[in-house]
Image (tube, rainbow, N blue to C red):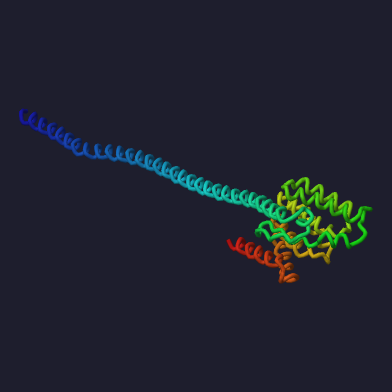
């Protein structure tokens, strides 16, 4: 009986020991699975954080690109402002140049002699050329259209030219138009058309100036003013962005009147146009 009880106790103890051993072996595996699950979650959080970092880096790159673009635009604006300033300086130089030339003419004689005498060549941007008709030729031409005589025509012309000398370009334009209307066939009429165009050109009214210079070429093809008028036609076309027409007109000046001052100025302007097209 005692042996039976001992054997039963031993058996139960063995079973308890086996169960305890099994639990001891199972616990590390369960703990390991728990640790792997936690690591996965940490890895997931790290991945999310990395994605956010990459997104932030992308935003930084975009900001840098936008900053570079803004800097490029600022540089372009500065270039345009510089170009605009150059144009303004050029316009001012044209006014000063014309005023100084007319002042020199005025010092050289009366309004009559200055209107008919040679005009020095100006800068390439706004040249003035010889007014080739003298009062004597106007007087000897005989009849004057519109019923006036040579003296009245000369006086009217002088009034317009004096307004141009004084820098009253709008008044000069009106006076020259009045002269042309009253004396359309006078010997001074080609000169009146030329100075009318000049009064518009110096105030940058290039379209109207172009029409005035073209009128000389069409209506007075034998006039000594034609080379200069053609030159100014090319200048006006260039200012009106009609570059191909300007080059064709200026080239025609150089071929038709190769030894003239107009041809020299035309070649200079063609050279400048070529340089601008290269740049």
Asked if residue 43 lies left or right of residue 264, the reply is left
Could you tell me residue 109's position as x and y percent?
Answer: 74, 55
* Residue at 80% from the left image edge and 52% from the top image edge: 158
**Against 277, is 86 above or below?**
above
Indicate the quadrant containing the N terminus: top left, top right, bottom left or bottom right.
top left
Could you tell me residue 8's position as x and y percent?
Answer: 11, 31
Give residue 32's quadrant in the image.
Answer: top left
* Residue at 70% from the left image edge and 53% from the top image edge: 107
Q: Residue furthest left?
A: 2
* Residue at 46% from the left image edge and 43% from the top image edge: 63
**Against 40, is 145 above or below?**
below
Could you tell me residue 111's position as x and y percent?
Answer: 77, 53
Give residue 9's quadrant in the image.
Answer: top left
Name the residue nearer the viewer: 121 or 141: 141
Give residue 50's quadrant in the image.
Answer: top left
Name the residue nearer the viewer: 210 or 130: 130
Name the residue nearer the viewer: 7 or 63: 63
Name the residue nearer the viewer: 26 or 267: 267
């Amino acid at each position: 009986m005692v042996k039976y009880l001992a054997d039963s106790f031993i058996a139960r103890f063995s079973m308890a020991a086996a169960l305890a051993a099994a639990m001891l072996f199972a616990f590390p595996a369960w703990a390991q699975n728990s640790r792997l699950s936690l690591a996965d979650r940490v890895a997931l959080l790290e991945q999310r954080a990395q994605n956010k970092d990459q997104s932030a880096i992308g935003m930084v790159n975009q900001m840098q690109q936008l900053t570079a673009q803004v800097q490029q635009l600022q540089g372009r604006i500065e270039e345009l402002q510089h170009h605009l300033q150059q144009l303004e300086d050029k316009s001012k130089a044209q006014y000063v140049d014309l005023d100084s030339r007319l002042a020199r003419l005025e010092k050289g004689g009366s309004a009559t002699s200055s209107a008919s005498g040679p005009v020095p060549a100006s800068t390439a941007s706004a040249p003035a050329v010889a007014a080739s008709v003298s009062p004597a030729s106007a007087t000897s031409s005989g009849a004057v259209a519109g019923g006036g005589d040579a003296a009245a025509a000369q006086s009217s012309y002088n009034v317009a030219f004096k307004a141009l000398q004084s820098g009253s370009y709008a008044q000069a334009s009106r006076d020259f138009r009045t002269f042309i209307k009253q004396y359309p066939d006078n010997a001074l009429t080609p000169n009146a058309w030329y100075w009318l165009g000049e009064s518009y050109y110096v105030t940058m009214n290039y379209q109207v100036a172009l029409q005035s210079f073209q009128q000389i070429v069409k209506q007075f093809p034998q006039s000594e003013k034609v080379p200069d008028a053609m030159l100014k036609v090319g200048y006006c076309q260039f200012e009106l962005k009609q570059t191909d027409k300007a080059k064709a007109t200026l080239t025609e000046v150089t071929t038709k009147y190769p030894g003239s001052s107009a041809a020299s100025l035309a070649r200079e302007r063609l050279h400048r146009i070529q340089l601008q097209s290269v740049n």
